[in-house]
Image (spheres, helix red, strand yellow):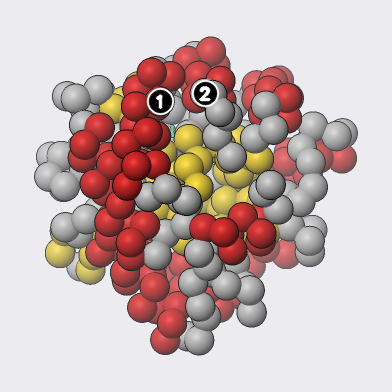
Amino acid sequence: MEKLIITAAICGAEVTKELNPNIPYSIDEIGKEAELAYKAGASIIHLHVREDDGTPTQNIDKFKVCIEEIKNRCPDVIIQPSTGGVVGMSNKERLQPIYLEPPPEMATLDCGTCNFGGDEIFINTENTIIEFAKKMNERGIKPELECFDKGMVDMALKLHDKGYIKDPMHFSFVLGVNGGIKASARDLTFLVESIPKDSTYSVCAIGRHEYPMVTLSIIMGGHARVGFEDNVYLSKGVLAKSNGELVEKVVRISRELGRDIATPMEARKILGLN
Ligand code: KMH
Ligand code: ZN
């Protein structure tokens, strides 16, 4: 089986130090967390950035300094900025990191609108998705197609057929969001069977669902995302000390199951990055 690409979603936009004091906010904290994840086996860092007080931001200058810090510590890691930001941000705010110089190799492309619990709605209209996809194409950025539900997979496939999303497609199945598809073996199988055979996919899941779903992905030939953005616990009731610990755990599981871990260069080859 192809080697496993591990993505570390090191800080997210919504989790706070109140939930786990090890969530990184500052440039230095973000750099340290990226390095721990990378040294443990992550080849992609999925990146959100924060103000020093933890407020999520999509400010391009903040991305720039955080990426410099990460590159100093992990020179060959793939950095994948979020274009999702946080619920309520405008498209213009969200798109800022795709204008970085040089452009990032990858960025997320959220493929639909989703309830996020309570009154929160993460809005991605069809026109928004097309606008983001076009801009990523212009900048030579590979989109990671974030799908929180089956309809988002179908939207990505439709926009692929219309030429807005290029081959080879890479999906990220986000399971167990409050408002999205369930974190279950049946639902993951449904998603995997819905995408073209020559595409790749990674799986992440919220909270306690993270390791069971990621383990299924390892077995099924998909890739894995772990990190504080999705889950702050190493095991039941035990807060993770770092993203490194979360990555070490998925490395252990994968090796036990006989699947080796991809280096960043191997990940680039698998994903068709230049
Ligand atoms: N924070 C969520 C609103 C992404 O990175 O593209 C969106 C998100 C997905 O995290
Ligand atoms: Zn994200």
For the N terminus, give its image quadrant: bottom right
Q: Residues within 10 Å of mark 2 (few under 14, many from 20)?
A: some
> At which x and y percent is residue 192?
67, 63
* Residue at 67% across, 49% down: 273
* Residue at 22% across, 55% down: 242
> At which x and y percent is residue 104?
55, 34
> At which x and y percent is residue 233?
23, 59
Q: Is residue 128 visible?
A: yes
Given residues 146 and 1, the one toward you in this image is 1
Q: Is residue 88 left or right of residue 142?
A: left
Q: Is residue 162 left or right of residue 34?
A: right
Given residues 209 and 20, the one toward you in this image is 20
How many numbered marks are there?
Answer: 2
Mark 2: which amino acid? Answer: Leu
Disc 2 to disc 1: CB gap under 8 Å: yes
Mark 1: which amino acid? Answer: Lys
Residue 201's image quarter? bottom right
Given residues 25 and 238, the one toward you in this image is 25
| Secondary element at tag 1 | helix
| Secondary element at tag 2 | loop
> At which x and y percent is residue 49?
34, 30
* Residue at 46% across, 50% down: 77
Q: Read off the residue under disc 2.
A: 100
Q: Residues within 10 Å of mark 1 (few under 14, many from 20)?
A: some
- Disc 2 within 8 angstroms of ligand 1 (CB): no
Q: Give the image quadrant in which the ligand numbered 2 is located.
A: top left
On screen, 120 above or below 17? above
Q: Read off the residue under disc 1.
A: 64
Q: Is residue 34 visible?
A: no
On screen, 220 above or below 28? below
